[in-house]
Image (cartoon, rainbow, N blue to C red):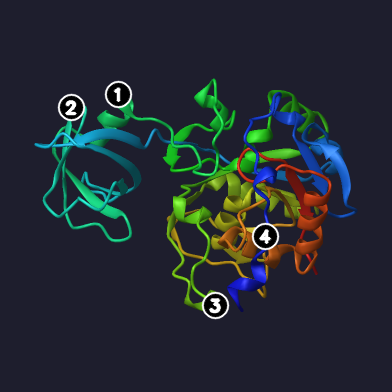
Amino acid sequence: MKTADFHYDLPEEAIAQVAIEPRDAARLLDTRDMSDHRFGDLPSLLREGDLVVLNSTRVRPARLIGAKEGSGGWVEALLLRPRGDGSWEALIRPARRIREGTRLRFGDLLAVVAASPSEGQVVLTPEWGSFDAAMKTIGEVPLPPYFHGHLDDPERYQTIYGDRPGSAAAPTAGLHFTPEVLASLRSRGIARTAIELDIGLDTFRPIVTPDLASHPMHREGVRVGEDAAKAIDAVREREGRVVAVGTTVVRALESAATGGGRVEPREADTSLFIVPGHEFSVVDLLVTNFHVPASTLVVLIAAFLGERWRHAYATALGRGYRFLSFGDSMLAERAG
């Protein structure tokens, strides 16, 4: 499959630059009949007995601003993944003057670059202090690079139900939920559970290889607990549907699938690349935002919706829907 097959024209003016308030005032396109709704209408579009699955990770304050030891030159590090020994994989800028052995100071943390940057990415090893402490004291939540607006409250880039920092970016489909939407789900007999997938920045990057088979899929940490597995067992017993909130939930659940629409508890990394032809085992419905052209997320949407994805995206653009992280959303049903 060619990467170009998953491209579409996204005008700059369609990229949301304002976080709409209240959260559930965002628009929602029901792609089953291409009808327009508010996100607050979501519970009325589902059925009693359905199960909504959320990604409960929070965005960590992973953006550190510091200086090169000695010269004092400005430097920024965006922490991506811990390596288990106190060091972190990070994106660094400006990378052109960073070399192996360069020492960087971020507040009380002194870190050394373990190897010269490769595509702007390095491994940083602490010599004094810790990255956890630095994030708590001077860390900032990184906003998407295509968002040029301003957030009065950094919590607007967190879901209201996130409870454990672990991601480099927000599970953006969940940004639309409010306490009122969650209460409405409960009152309508729609259950909910949560999994965790630690979102990395590679999730949002366009695919640069000409064909999908050559794309090196990134790894992300997944935790599907016993409660989530039992909730999915229960929804299958009552013949309800699994409603994934976001592509991250789809990736997590499909990575933990055991067949028959069920999952097993799992805590591991996944490098699952969902492309057209993937046989979805768990997810029946998907709530998601509109994604970057020719990204792995658009490929996943194409796998889930089939060729209807183009009609859905063209309809949303034609009706003035807002795209990407702070944009509007859609409800999709699995093809087939």
Residue topped by disc 4: 282
Q: Earlier in the sequence, mark 1 or mark 2?
A: 2
Residue topped by disc 2: 108
Query: Nearest the camera: 84 or 212?
Result: 212
Callout 1: SS? helix
Q: Which mark is residue 41?
A: none
Foreground: disc 3 or disc 4? 3
Residue 54 shows in this picture? no
The residue lying at 59 percent from left, 56 percent from top is 253
- Residue 77: image location, x then y, percent: 30, 42
Give the residue type at disc 2. Asp
Give the residue type at disc 1. Thr
Q: Which mark is residue 137?
A: 1
Q: Are marks 2 and 3 in contact (CB under 8 Å)?
A: no
Q: Residues within 10 Å of mark 3 (few under 14, many from 20)?
A: few
Give the residue type at disc 4. Val
Q: Residue furthest left?
A: 70
Foreground: disc 1 or disc 4? 1
Q: Is residue 107 above or below residue 219?
A: above
Foreground: disc 2 or disc 3? 3
Callout 3: SS? loop
Residue topped by disc 3: 211
Q: Earlier in the sequence, mark 2 or mark 3?
A: 2
Q: Residues within 10 Å of mark 2 (few under 14, many from 20)?
A: some
Q: Earlier in the sequence, mark 1 or mark 3?
A: 1
Q: Is residue 298 above or below residue 172?
A: below
Q: Are marks 1 and 2 in contact (CB under 8 Å)?
A: yes
Q: Are marks 2 and 4 in contact (CB under 8 Å)?
A: no
Query: Nearest the camera: 150 or 86?
Result: 150
